[in-house]
Amino acid sequence: MTLRPSAFPTLILVGVFLAVDTATQLAFKAAAEAIGDLPLGLDFLASAAGTAFAWLAVALYLATYVLWMLVLKDTALSRAFPLTALSYVSVPLFAWLAFGEAVDARTAAGIGLILLGVALIGHGAEADAVPEEELTPCET
């Protein structure tokens, strides 16, 4: 896969999206741990509303929304979406670092397969890319 210079801003934006998406999941986990074993109900919601990690998760979730819109503004969904699978790599690794969650051989193998899949899709997308002027919208 060869990268065009114009692809770098998009790749940086996707990298920021993945970092924020990973941080979002870690904040959700920290909020869930802070809430504890409360069953879903008013006490659960009150506890969540009083947890800084829950509010951080909400803010980060909104940031992922904005970043994803920025990515899709200049990138085809079919090219950008496979890159989001990289969160299946970053989240388990950072959950291991932050929460001591296990990354066993099966998880490591899955991470390897995801990396391979993203590389294959990315390489295929580059080879199969059709200039926008040649594309026509679908008619219904």
Image (cartoon, grey):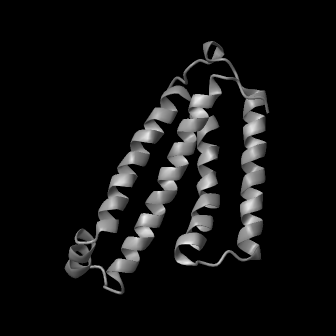
> For residue 52, what is the image quadrant?
bottom left
* Residue 43: quadrant of the picture: bottom left
Left or right side of 50 for 110: right
Query: Which one is nearer the viewer's eye here, 119 or 139?
Result: 119
The N terminus is located in which quarter? top right
Q: Residue furthest top?
A: 133
Exactly how many numbered labels are in the figure?
A: 0
Q: In this image, 124 relative to 62: left or right?
A: right
Q: For residue 48, say whether it is visible.
A: yes
Depth check, front residue: 73 or 139: 73
Measured from the top left, where is residue 106 in percent x and y?
75, 74
Looking at the picture, tell me which residue is in the foreground, 110 or 53.
53
Give the percent coordinates (x, y) of residue 69.
Answer: 44, 36
Q: Is residue 111 left or right of residue 70?
A: right
Residue 79: % across, % down: 64, 36
Residue placed at 37% from the left, 72% from the top? Answer: 31
Residue at left offset 33%, top offset 79%? 35
For residue 86, above or below residue 2? below
- Residue 89, image x and y in percent? 65, 59
Q: In the image, is residue 31 above or below residue 25?
A: below
Left or right, residue 130 beside residue 59:
right
Q: Can residue 76 be seen in this snapshot?
A: no
> In this view, which residue lies farthest toward the bottom?
37
Outermost residue on the front side: it is 97
Residue 54: name its quadrant: bottom left
Q: Residue at x 41, y 67 (%)?
A: 28
Question: Which residue corresponds to the image point at 71% horizontal and 71% vertical from the top-left?
Answer: 107
- Looking at the image, residue 44 lies above or below residue 93: below
